[in-house]
């Protein structure tokens, strides 16, 4: 299946299935009891990625947090049901499709493990879509995909692409039919998978339509938060930056000061070293100050959206790029910014830090209220066991395992830089 086909399938379902990611829901009417036993939680945990399973197998606190996350997911899904979201025609179609895909995938997996099993043929798929209502079902699937992803709206799908999409959907739906006939849908592991995949669909819909809009921080709320947290006040940060600047100009080791005081996670441990960069790679305030300095000089305080910078130029050079001279600077900097350092991204302004904190508080309050409303009929076991995952066999770096390469944390962006560093350079 190529990437375009995957996008259509994912958009039609409204969720993306990925290896090791299980998120589900209860197929129950409003108010009915949800009870996940210790065996259920063991099954759910055993379907997680090996690294997660390893942590759950050895850490009691991690298992309690895992159970709490499942409980919250189910509670938000039940809240969505109470608001009628599950009964909207578009959501009901997506929930039915989630069920079909889970059963179909589990059926096909069971057949891969059964020697001599007959695969789903093209003739069987063609015959399926000739049945009454199935062609209309496929057309509705395409409409739902376009509604879910506006970028697909009005797209003309090439005939070969349309054939591939139809084949993949037909394979899943025929697989569902075969799976039901084989009793796959009655297996507890499959029931749980359907449960939580549908819960994720309901919860994400409710979050996008209700939770997120109602937890946006207002300007007065941000002002009030900053007033209660003086460490976010720019006056204090400026005073600290001025003191560090004084020490740097007095001859203290710049790299040592950067390691002690800088809040830039991307350069702090390197003594503030940003490497070489050309004009235009940094935000305007930083760029102007850096290129105005000579090697060995230290700037005045430079304020940008990231905080207060102290810049020291180490070297300058001019190279040729695309036949034109390219002036470059090798510099270090010390960043003084509010809030804790983020190892996976640039620091935020004090106001953005306050905004995030306000929104997180509002989200937690709303989530706690939802869980309290729904908890009387949701029981999730916290005391459950998780088997250790099998040891990972080391492999030569000749390719990636099935499913593609593991995701790496996003690279830190140099504060002042407009884009993340490439190839280790900023």
Image (cartoon, grey):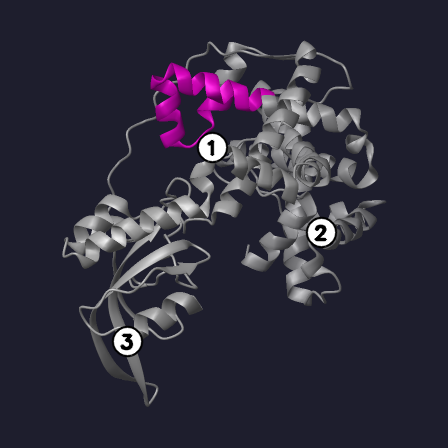
Kindly tell me whether residue 185 is visible in this rendering: no
Q: In the picture provided, is 2 more to the left or to the right than 32? A: left
Range of magenta residues: 44-71
Residue 47 part of the magenta segment: yes
- Which one is earlier in the sequence, the residue at label 3 or at label 2? 2
Q: Please determine whether, in this image, residue 415 is positioned above or below residue 176.
A: below
The residue that label 3 is drawn on is 328
Image quarter in which the C terminus is found? bottom left
Q: Position of residue 75 (x, y in %)?
A: 66, 22
Question: Mark number for residue 134?
Answer: none
- Front residue of 85/158: it is 85
Q: Position of residue 13 (x, y in %)?
A: 67, 43
**Real-space Cα distance between discs 2 and 1?**
32 Å
**Real-space Cα distance between discs 3 and 2?**
47 Å
Q: Please determine whether, in this image, residue 109 is positioned above or below residue 145.
A: above
* Label 2 crowd bin: few (<14), some (14–19), many (20+), radius 10 Å: many
Q: Position of residue 349 (x, y in %)?
A: 47, 49
The quadrant holding residue 118 is top right
Q: Residue at x 40, y 29 (%)?
A: 52
Label 1 element class:
loop
Which marked residue is nearer to the observer: mark 3 or mark 2? 3
Label 2 element class:
helix
Q: Please determine whether, in this image, residue 94 is positioned above or below residue 144.
A: above
Please identify the residue farthest to the bottom as the structure is shown: 323
- Front residue of 49/159: it is 49
- Which one is earlier in the sequence, the residue at label 3 or at label 1? 1
Q: Residue at x 23, y 44 (%)?
A: 260
The residue that label 1 is drawn on is 113
Question: Mark number for residue 145?
Answer: 2
Q: In this figure, what is the number of numbered marks?
A: 3
């Amino acid at each position: 299946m190529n990437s375009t086909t995957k996008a259509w399938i994912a958009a039609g379902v409204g969720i993306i299935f990925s290896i090791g990611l299980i998120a589900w829901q209860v197929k129950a009417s409003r108010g009915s009891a949800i009870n996940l036993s210790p065996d259920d939680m063991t099954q759910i945990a055993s379907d997680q990625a090996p690294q997660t399973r390893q942590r759950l197998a050895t850490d009691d606190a991690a298992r309690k947090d895992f159970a709490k996350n499942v409980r919250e997911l189910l509670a938000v899904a039940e809240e969505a049901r109470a608001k009628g979201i599950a009964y909207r025609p578009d959501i009901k179609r997506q929930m039915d499709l989630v069920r079909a895909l889970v059963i179909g995938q589990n059926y096909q997996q069971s057949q891969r493990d059964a020697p001599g099993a007959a695969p789903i043929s093209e003739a069987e798929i063609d015959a399926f879509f000739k049945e009454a209502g199935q062609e209309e079902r496929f057309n509705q699937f395409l409409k739902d995909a376009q509604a879910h992803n506006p970028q697909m709206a009005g797209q003309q799908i090439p005939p070969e692409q349309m054939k591939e999409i139809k084949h993949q959907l037909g394979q899943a739906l025929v697989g569902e039919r075969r799976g039901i006939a084989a009793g796959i849908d009655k297996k507890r592991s499959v029931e749980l998978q359907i449960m939580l995949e549908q819960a994720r669909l309901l919860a994400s819909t409710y979050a996008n339509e209700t939770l997120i809009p109602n937890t946006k921080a207002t300007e007065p709320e941000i002002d009030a938060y900053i007033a209660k947290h003086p460490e976010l006040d720019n006056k204090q940060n400026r005073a600290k930056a001025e003191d560090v600047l004084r020490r740097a100009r007095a001859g203290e080791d710049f790299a040592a000061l950067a390691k002690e005081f800088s809040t830039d996670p991307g350069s702090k441990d390197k003594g503030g070293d940003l490497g070489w960069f050309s004009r235009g790679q940094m935000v305007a305030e930083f760029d102007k100050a850096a290129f105005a300095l000579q090697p060995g000089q230290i700037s005045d305080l430079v304020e940008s959206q990231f905080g207060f910078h102290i810049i020291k130029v180490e070297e300058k050079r001019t190279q040729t790029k695309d036949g034109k001279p390219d002036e470059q600077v090798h510099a270090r900097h010390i960043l003084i910014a509010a809030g804790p350092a983020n190892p996976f991204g640039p620091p935020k302004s004090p106001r953005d830090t306050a905004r995030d904190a306000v929104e997180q508080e509002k989200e937690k309050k709303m989530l706690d209220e939802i869980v309290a409303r729904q908890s009387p009929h949701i029981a999730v076991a916290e005391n459950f066991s998780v088997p250790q995952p099998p040891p990972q066999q080391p492999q030569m770096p000749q390719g990636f395992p099935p499913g593609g390469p593991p995701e790496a944390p996003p690279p830190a962006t140099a504060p002042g830089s407009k884009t993340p560093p490439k190839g280790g350079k900023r």
